[in-house]
Image (cartoon, rainbow, N blue to C red):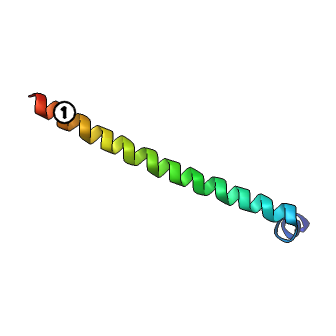
Amino acid sequence: MHALRDFFSTDYGLLSAAVIAFMLGMGVFYARYFIKHMRDDEAAARAAAAAQK
């Protein structure tokens, strides 16, 4: 319990929480970004393959 109190009440604990939240947010952003671009590339490849037929 003392660790949680330190985590949310000290300056280094709050900075750690901010870094953890930022890293999780960045991970979600990059996962969505990569998935979107992979889908776009797949659609472009399918369109190119269909145009060749």
Q: Which residue is mark 1?
A: 48
**Which is more toward the observer, 37 or 7?**
37
Amino acid type, residue under disc 1 in the picture? Ala
Quarter of the C terminus within the rendering = top left
- Is residue 31 positioned above or below 7 on the image? above
**Which residue is located at x 62 percent, y 55 percent?**
24
**Outermost residue, top side:** 52
The residue shown at (29%, 38%) is 42
Residue at screen point 31% across, 39% down:
41
Q: Quadrant of the N terminus?
A: bottom right
Where is residue 31 drawn, in percent x and y? 49, 48
Name the residue located 12 percent from the left edge and 33 percent from the top edge. Answer: 51
Q: Is residue 52 left or right of residue 22?
A: left
Q: Quadrant of residue 34?
A: top left
Residue with the most extreme left position: 53
Q: Residues within 10 Å of mark 1 (few under 14, many from 20)?
A: few
In the displayed image of the protein, which residue is found farthest to the right?
A: 2
Left or right position of 19 against 46:
right
Report helix, strand or loop for mark 1. Answer: helix
Classify 40 as above or below 17: above
In-image side of 11 versus 31 (left or right): right
For residue 6, which quarter of the picture?
A: bottom right
